[in-house]
DNA sequence: ACATTGACCTGAGAGC
DNA sequence: TGCTCTCAGGTCAATG
């Protein structure tokens, strides 16, 4: 599930539920999801501490602690999400990290497939650099000029390029389909062969689609009816021209597109 | 150097 | 009902 809009919604959820509350205890339920940190280190950093802010870069969420200037870093894989709850009856099904606040509430990081990661860092910038993440897809400082120049040099297909986190961070399988659908570009086109106008189109739609998705709380049911996301299934029709939606494997992932609106 | 493939996990749904 | 197979909104290491 979690691409940039989803993680942005998680960030806002975290801000509205979990700041400035004393952390009574921390339970690491899946040690295999820890990356470059021990369970003991996470516990000693968070316990008796509290959270004071949060940042997002691409699909990563950074949560800053009040003391020690440490940041808990979560990646949500394909199935991760956060849940803040009091009553244990509301506990989600696959808790991997559980924070107990002294007010009796819990913040759970749930990740069924365990494809996400839990880390700790002194600096989000250093973390981003180390993981070789590109600019965040909604970073206003990442200009159309830079985007066009970068993507002209990439040899793969445009869909794969948009999903590559080292080129640009935050876009995954679902939103790359939407951006290309809105831009009217076939996902299998070579990035380097796109015209200046196509680049501009993709760049604008990338910003528009991601912002629109955040406004809709990354909830497919609340997206505009002109989006292809609710129609990403075989046998469905294009919301713009009513042609049948087609699918194709591109870079190992399933791309859905409209053969009429997105010609090669 | 760059692009593609398989592995990593777990569960839901389709088909028999 | 129960089995097997395929697929899933992600990434990383290994391969071509």
Image (cartoon, coloured by chain):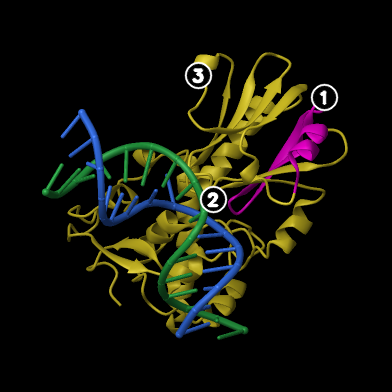
Chain colours: A yellow, B green, C blue
What number is the disc on residue A90?
3
Mark 2 against mark 1, which lies toward the viewer? 1
Chain letter of the residue beneath label 2 in the structure image:
A
Percent x, y of residue A239? 24, 53
Mark 2 against mark 3, which lies toward the viewer? 3
Please give the name of the residue rendered at 36% of the width and 70% of the height, measured from the top-left corner.
A185
Q: Is residue A96 magenta?
A: no
Is A219 drawn above or below residue A194 in the view shown?
A: above
- Mark 2 vs 3: CB contact within 8 A: no
Give a yes or no on whether discs 2 and 3 share a subunit: yes
Give the magenta-colored segment's residue range: A37-64
Residue pointed to by mark 1: A48
Is A247 drawn above or below residue A90 in the view shown?
A: below
Residue lying at the far right of the rendered structure: A68
Horizontally, residue A203 falls left or right of residue A184, namely: right
Percent x, y of residue C4? 25, 50
Q: CA distance from mark 2 to mark 1?
A: 31 Å
Chain letter of the residue beneath label 3 in the structure image:
A
Front residue of this view, candidates B9 and A185: B9
Front residue of this view, candidates A197 and B15: B15
What number is the disc on residue A222?
none
Residue pointed to by mark 2: A4
Q: CA distance from mark 2 to mark 3?
A: 26 Å
Please give the name of the residue rendered at 21% of the width and 55% of the height, measured from the top-left corner.
A234
Q: CA distance from mark 1 to mark 3?
A: 24 Å
Q: Quadrant of residue A40?
A: top right
Percent x, y of residue A130? 73, 62
Q: Is residue A21 among the parts visible in the rendering?
A: no
Please give the name of the residue rendered at 76% of the width and 25% of the height, measured from the top-left corner.
A20
């Amino acid at each position: 599930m979690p691409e940039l809009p989803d993680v942005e919604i998680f960030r806002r959820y975290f801000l509205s539920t979990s700041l400035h509350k004393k952390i009574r205890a921390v339970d690491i339920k899946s040690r295999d999801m820890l990356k470059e940190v021990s369970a003991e280190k996470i516990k000693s950093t968070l316990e008796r501490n509290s959270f004071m802010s949060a940042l997002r870069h691409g699909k990563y969420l950074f949560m800053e602690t009040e003391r020690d200037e440490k940041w808990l870093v979560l990646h949500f894989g394909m199935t991760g999400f956060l849940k803040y709850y009091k009553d244990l009856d509301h506990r989600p099904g696959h808790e991997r990290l559980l924070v107990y606040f002294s007010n009796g509430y819990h913040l759970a990081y749930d990740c069924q497939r365990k494809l996400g990661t839990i880390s700790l860092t002194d600096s989000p910038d250093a973390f981003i650099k180390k993981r070789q993440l590109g600019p965040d897809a909604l970073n206003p400082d990442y200009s159309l000029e830079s985007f066009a120049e970068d993507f002209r040099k990439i040899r793969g297909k445009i869909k794969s390029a948009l999903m590559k986190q080292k080129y640009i961070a935050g876009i995954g399988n679902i939103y790359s389909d939407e951006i290309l659908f809105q831009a009217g570009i076939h996902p299998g086109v070579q990035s380097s062969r796109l015209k200046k106008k196509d680049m501009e189109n993709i760049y604008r739609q990338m910003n528009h689609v991601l912002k629109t998705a955040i406004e809709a709380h990354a909830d497919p049911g609340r997206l505009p009816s002109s989006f292809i996301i609710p129609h990403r299934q075989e046998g469905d029709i294009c919301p713009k021209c009513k042609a049948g939606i087609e699918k194709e494997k591109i870079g190992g992932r399933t791309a859905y597109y409209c053969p009429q609106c997105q010609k090669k």
